[in-house]
């Protein structure tokens, strides 16, 4: 049989490649973004409670009512924006599904989608599989990946259908500011351009910074699909439960795709999350928790010959290694995994032309001992 590939240039995602290399070489895995510690025992108990209680059949297509209601309340409490649980909030199987469903709901053949690169690796394939055409705005480490909105504006054509945002940002650890939203609103007002805002690190934000979701700007809110994930917030990336917030008309189209992708999302975990979210401290404590991890990692690499700007959010610290070697970042990430036993992600993979700015991304969502050991090894370079 011959199968004609729909993605001939796509291999296996770098996260799987580097995690396997780390496992093969017994390396400390600071590559793929996941915590090496468990979620709250209380949350895990709640899941087993609902499993035992028999909440084991299909959840509603849109998600368990109690979970949609508490997401609505939390969003209103924090950002002052109201989403109706029945018609504007959908629970899905991870942010990856939310992103895919939102892209599929909006992008038609030939539509242009503006991507700010470096960008998370699932966006571009989802756009292309839907016949969309990515249009890139390249952000660079020299100015800490600041967005020049004049350049974004210059990329807008009558074919522009969508702009993808991600704050806090993977891989760079930067966050959007209120002025960014104002500048973007100026560009898209009076157009039919949609926004997908990937906010999986919403609660992983540091130094007292605020999370500037585009929903906090009314011009942006009416056109935005927010993609969230509980995996990051509650240290349970393997559960793959996320959600999408979007105004009613957008949600209707989103759900039409979601019903054919997964139909509904794992039931007992939704009930457990609904209960857990009733206690705001369970998410309000997360920024301080991860800021301590970031600071720990930074202190562990203080003797390494890296230069960097501390991450403002996410669970990633990017570092420039050009004082150590002129190897390309992919070669170095592989060599460090094999030779010193520390795995990372080369940031070039997040650029469509694989621009090599000599930057590695390290995940600091790890216990202190792992961060210390990694720091010792990296300091010898
Ligand atoms: N977006 C970003 C920026 C991510 O880092 C991740 C990471 N895992 C996802 C989306 C996917 O989230 P989920 O695991 O909930 O599918
Ligand atoms: N988001 C995670 C990262 O950036 C990985 C998720 C995945 O492996 N698909 O490392």
Image (cartoon, rainbow, N blue to C red):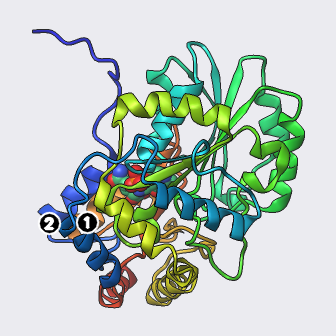
The quarter of the rendered structure image containing the N terminus is: top left
Determine if the C-beta at disc 1 is less than 8 A from ligand 2: no
Label 1 to label 2: alpha-carbon separation: 7 Å
- Find residue 349 and report its horizontal and vertical position in percent: 44, 46
Q: Are marks 1 and 2 in contact (CB under 8 Å)?
A: yes
**10 Å crowding of disc 1: few (<14), some (14-19), many (20+):** many
Give neighbour class at mark 2: few <14, some 14-19, many 20+ (Cα, 10 Å). some
Which residue: 78% across, 62% down? 177
Say which element carries label 2. Answer: loop
Sequence order check: which comes first, mark 1 or mark 2? 2
Task: Please provide percent x and percent y for residue 10.
Answer: 34, 30
Residue beneath disc 1? 337
What's the residue at 70%, 64% (across, down)? 76
For disc 2, the marked residue is 25
Q: Position of residue 186 (x, y in %)?
A: 90, 41
Specify whether residue 346 is in view: no
Which residue is rendered at x = 54% and y = 27% of the image?
105
Q: Nearer the viewer, residue 288 or 311?
A: 288
Quarter of the image holding residue 26? bottom left
């Amino acid at each position: 049989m011959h199968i004609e590939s729909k993605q001939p240039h796509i291999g296996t995602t770098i996260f799987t490649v580097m995690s396997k290399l780390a496992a093969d070489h017994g390396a400390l895995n600071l590559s793929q973004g996941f915590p090496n510690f468990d979620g709250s025992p209380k949350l895990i108990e709640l899941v087993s409670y609902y499993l035992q209680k028999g909440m084991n059949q299909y959840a509603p297509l849109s998600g368990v009512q109690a979970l949609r209601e508490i997401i609505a309340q939390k969003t209103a409490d924090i950002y002052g924006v109201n989403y109706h649980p029945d018609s504007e909030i959908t629970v899905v199987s991870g942010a990856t599904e939310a992103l895919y469903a939102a892209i599929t709901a909006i992008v038609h053949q030939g539509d242009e989608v503006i991507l700010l690169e470096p960008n998370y690796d699932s966006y571009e394939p989802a756009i292309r599989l839907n016949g969309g055409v990515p249009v890139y705005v390249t952000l660079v480490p020299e100015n800490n990946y600041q967005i020049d909105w004049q350049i974004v504006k210059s990329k807008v054509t009558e074919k522009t259908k969508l702009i993808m945002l991600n704050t806090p940002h993977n891989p760079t650890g930067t966050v959007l500011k209120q002025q960014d939203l104002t500048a973007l609103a100026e560009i898209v007002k009076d157009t039919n351009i949609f926004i997908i805002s990937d906010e999986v690190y919403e609660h992983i934000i540091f130094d007292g910074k605020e999370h500037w979701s585009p929903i906090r700007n009314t011009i942006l809110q009416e056109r935005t699909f927010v993609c969230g994930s509980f995996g990051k917030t509650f240290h349970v990336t393997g559960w793959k439960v996320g959600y999408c917030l979007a105004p009613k008309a957008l949600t209707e189209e989103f759900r039409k795709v979601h019903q054919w992708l997964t139909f509904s999302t794992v039931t007992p975990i939704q009930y457990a999350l609904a209960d857990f979210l009733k206690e705001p401290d369970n998410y309000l404590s997360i920024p301080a928790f991860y800021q301590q991890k970031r600071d720990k990692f930074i202190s562990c690499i203080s003797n390494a010959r890296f230069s960097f700007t501390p991450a403002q959010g996410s669970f990633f610290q990017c570092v420039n290694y050009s004082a150590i070697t002129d190897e390309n970042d992919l070669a170095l990430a592989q060599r460090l995994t094999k030779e010193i036993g520390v795995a990372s992600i080369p940031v070039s993979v997040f650029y469509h032309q694989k621009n090599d700015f000599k930057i590695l991304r390290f995940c600091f969502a790890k216990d202190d001992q792992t961060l210390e050991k990694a720091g010792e090894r990296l300091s010898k370079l």
